Structure formats: C-alpha cells, structure tokens
Image: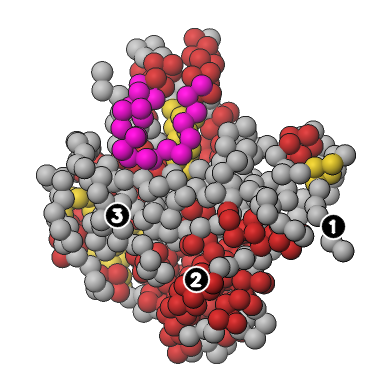
Amino acid sequence: MQLEYLELTELRKLLDQKKVSSVELTKYFLERIKKYDKELNSFITVTEKEALEQAAVADDFIASPGENPFLCGIPYAAKDLFCTKGVRTTAASKILDNYIPPYDATTISKLKEQKAVLLGKTNLDQFAHGSSGETSAYGPAKNPWDNNRMPGGSSSGSTTAVGAGLAPFALATETGGSIRFPASVSGITGWKPTYGRVSRYGVIAMGSSLDSPGVMVNSVVDAAQIAEIIAGHDEKDSTTGRNEVLAYSKNLNSDIKGLKIGMPKEYFTDGMEAGAKQKVLNGIKVLENLGAKIVEVSLPNTRYGQMVYAIIAPSEISSNLARYDGIRYGHSTSKAKNLMEVYTKSRAEGFGDEAKRRIMTGTYVLSAGYYDAYYKRAQKVRGLIIREFAEVFKQVDVLAAASTPSVAQKLGHAADDPLFGYIVDQLHIPSSLAGLTAMTFPCGFARPTDGETLSMDGLPVGLQIIGPQWGEQKVFNVGFAYQQVTDWHKKHPALEFGD
Amino acid sequence: MLTKEEVIKIAQLARIELSETEVEKFQKDLSTVLDYVEELKKVDVTGLEEVSQVSGLVNVQREDKVVDHGNREEILSIAPETKDGYFKVKAIL
C-alpha cells in the first residue's frame, strides 16, 4: 500500500479502521527516510526510537474505546527551530549543536496531546536566515524534484520531507517567505498564518514581530485541519490573539462565486520567469472560471517592503540572538581568557556567516546616530505598507499572486550574495510585515531558465493567496476550490537522482 | 563603504570576534545591505507613526504568581559550566 502522499483524512481512516497501525505507518516513513534522505538531507535529527515509542502509545490509545484525536498516530516532522523536550534542537547552527531543550514549544505540546508521532527535526537555513536552505551548518537540503537544485528556504527540510513523501506533514515557520517560497518551488501546499494566530512559544526566535509558525502539507484540506489544532491564544505568547479558532476544515466551501480576488499589479512585473508567470496566470484563470471576480489592484509601496525588512528583521535578530552567550546553554569556547572572550569567541565559533551578517547589520542600524535614519524610518514605512493592504482589502476579499518569481534555482546560486534572501522574498515580505495570512499551492510546472533539469515535467510553480489578518477561512476556501478542480497537488517527484 | 574601524566597532558591540579577512568581507557585505536600503530615504514619512508590531494588542498582562517548573536540574545540566547549582562564569574583575 502506498501511504506517503495520502491526505490526513485518509490516514485517519486507515488507522481508525485498523487497516494500518501507527507503528507500521511510522516504520513506513522511517524506511523512506533511510532510503532517500542520505541524498535529500531534509532531516538533521531522526528520532527513530522515540517515534516508535510514541507510535506504540498511539496504537494502545486507538485500541481503547472512544474517539481518537484527529492526528493520533500520524507521523510528522518539525523544523529544527521548534524546541522539543529531550530532543536536540539546533536551528541548523553550530552554536546550538548540543542543545537539548528542557521544554516543548506550544505547537509541539499540542501535537503531543493529539498523540501525533514526531519522526525528527528538519533542516533549515541557519536560524531561518536565508531563502535557499544553504546557510544550514549541516549542509543544504535538496529539492526532491531535482537534487541539483535548492528546495527553497528557510524551511528547506520541512518542504523536502513533505515533497518527497518522507513525512505526511511538517511544522515550519515563516518570517518573510520561509513557508511560501520553499513550498512553492518544491511543489507542495503551505500555510502562513496571521501573525499571532499560532503561538511562537518555544520556537527559536528570529524576528519576533514577524515570526509565524505554520505548516507544510499535501493539500489545503490538510492545512485547514492542522490549523484548527495548532491555532489559538497561548498564555505563554502574549502576542497571540483571542480571536475564535474556526472549524476551518468543516467550514471549507468551494463555492467562490462572486468572491473578489485582487491581482496586485506590482507583483506581476519585476524579473519573473515567463514560464512560471504563465502558470500563475493560468491558475488565476481557474479561479475566475469558478466564478471569482478578478480585479487589478495596486500596492505601490511593495518595492519598499524588502528594504523595510532588511532593516527590521536584522534589528530583531541582533536582539534575539544576543542570548547566545556561551554561558547558559549552547556552544561555549574553550579558548577564552576572560568573560568578554567567552562571549566574543563562543559567538565567533558558533554563528555562521549569515547570522553574523544579520546580527551586525541589526547592531549597526540600531546604534546611536543611525537609529532614526534606519530603524525608525523603516518602522514608519512599515505602517505605510500595512495601511496600503487595509485599503486594498476594502475592495477585494483576497489577493492572488505568484509564490515564486522563478522555479527552483541551482544549488550554489545564493552563495555569497548578501541580498539573495531579501530579493527572492519580494512576493512575501510586504504581507509578512503586515501580519497577514497566506497560502501557497502548486499550479503547474515550468522549465527553468538557468539550464536543464532532471525533472521530466519541469519544476513546480506555486500560486499564493493572501488574505487579511484573521482571514484564514477565506484563504483556505480559495485553495480548497482550486484543489477540487485541479490535481497539481497530486503530482509527486520521481525521486530519481542525478550525481 | 563602511570603514574597517566601523566594522570592528559593530562587531565589538555585537560581541563577535572577527578575523582580519572577516572584517574585510563584512565591510563589503554590510555596505551592500546599507546601500540597498538607502532608497528608503526617498519615502515621505511625514506624519507617519512608527509601527513596532501588528497584533493590535496593548499591555497584555497575566497574574504575577510564582510557579515552580521543577526543572532546575535539567536547565543546569545543559549549561557549559556550573557550580553549586549556579551558572559559572569567568571572573569579571
């Protein structure tokens, strides 16, 4: 029986009807990890022993009378940015190489309550700084469609694990595109929640005013189901809203007749590959054929989004990463002669180039004399961007755009370009700055423009739907309607690798 | 472009030791980022409020009560150096 790309509802049915046990299911995915992950490098840590123990507990629960929680016995992977009690959590950095958290992130606790089974911790750009997965201190994850290409980042391992069928779903995080971009270039579905919809507690912090934990999945239905479980107010994260968590999956409605979908013209210009652009336009046409009303809208300050982000994100990073001091946990140098050297050498040895670059950028723009010119100004422009979205959402229900300006690029492309991470995220950053929700799903394949690809069909292209704050249901409905009439989300890579 | 001295000063503030080659590398890299954001100076920001967060929430508080998490040993066990139940640091003076 092929189990790797089944929707969660199917897995639930198989488990409830005892057609497969959680232990069998878990072994099935562990076997796939063994077979494919040497090449794909999507996991930093595989928790085989713990997973089998959790699966056995889930099986006992399923055998006992009463209803089973939706994710009971279903395996999953988590980006190695989510703290997991007793399980090494590295943030793909050397400074946390030996870090074993004494507590669970709230999202992990919620999945534990469900008796979901953690298969392991997935690769990412170091501290989630990057868009290609290549800043990981544990080597890059590879794109499951073409192992010479990057899977997108920062949630590189989560997208590869789901795209290659090594896990039914994976937790991921987004600060400025880190779910939408990798999901789109790896051909899967991803949900970026409204800021404050899902708790950040226990997720290693990057930019605290932006970080949004979400999921990477095989379908919009899966995303809606997990959203119901992981969303909600958390006393341990005071920025989580008390807005009601809707029955997103039960409410899914594919009738989008009359729904107004805005196409921001600024999102369809600069430097998009023609092939990818065409697939996105085709995707929007599908929505139009379903009865949605497509309206051109304008977000003229879009171009400033990346610049605002290039100031605000490093500022928050420099502050958040100050905690890695070589004293309480994480890497500590053996070469220090005094306390100052414990800090400076531990941090020099433990952080990679990208983390250093961002910490120092943030330190500079926050320092006396530059604060007003950079940080304060960026915060004001952020307000402008937020206001602009609010105006547009008076005219339309959701926005549609490409999730990626190009198909997956070759590994090595991003190396030594200090702006790569900022530029590639231009389609995501303004909405992240405004704290909006969004979703990406596959809408076709296109040929790359930077050489050939091993993948016969070409490489995946994603369509993104952006909704207003707390507009999860609308965004899910549009994705659901799309996936009812298309089967791009059911295309999976052959997993035949070149050298 | 930032001067070497400026990069060294930033690195000191950020508590990161840099090698000679790193100073040169980051001189270029940081300057690239700063040049990139230069254009923001063209945006008219008169009358705009600074926005530091988007949640709309103000002064979220919870009851100030002592909770024993019972994981003192666990927390200390992951520290590089401890003594008598405390984190150990090098002499400051």
* Magenta span contains residue A42: yes
- The amino acid marked with disc number 1 is Ala
Q: Main secondary structure of the magenta part?
A: helix
Chain designation of label 2: B
Q: Is residue A299 left or right of residue A294?
A: right
Residue depicted at x 18% and y 61%: A450
Residue depicted at x 26% and y 63%: A405
In depth, the one of A481 and B62 nearer the eye is: B62
Residue depicted at x 64% and y 55%: A346
Residues beneath discs 1 and 2 located on the same chain: yes
- The amino acid marked with disc number 3 is Leu
**How far is disc 1 from disc 2 in space, using C-alphas?**
31 Å
In depth, the one of A195 and A139 nearer the eye is: A139
Dot label at residue A411: 3
Q: Which residues are magenta?
A: A28-49
Residues beneath discs 3 and 2 located on the same chain: no
**How far is disc 3 from disc 1 in space, using C-alphas?**
46 Å
Asked if residue A64 shows in the view, the reply is yes
Asked if residue A243 shows in the view, the reply is no
Image marks 3 and 1: residues in contact by CB distance under 8 Å: no
In depth, the one of A90 and A10 nearer the eye is: A90
- Label 2 sits on a secondary structure element that is helix
Q: Earlier in the sequence, mark 1 or mark 2?
A: 2
Q: How many marks?
A: 3
How far across and down, in percent of the image, does residue A408 sit? Answer: 26, 55
Q: Which residue is mark 2?
A: B21
Residues beneath discs 3 and 1 located on the same chain: no
Question: Circle 3: is it few (<14), some (14-19), or many (20+) Cα within 10 Å?
Answer: many
- Using the rendered view, name the quadrant where residue A1 is placed: top left
- Label 3 sits on a secondary structure element that is loop
Dot label at residue B91: 1
Chain designation of label 1: B
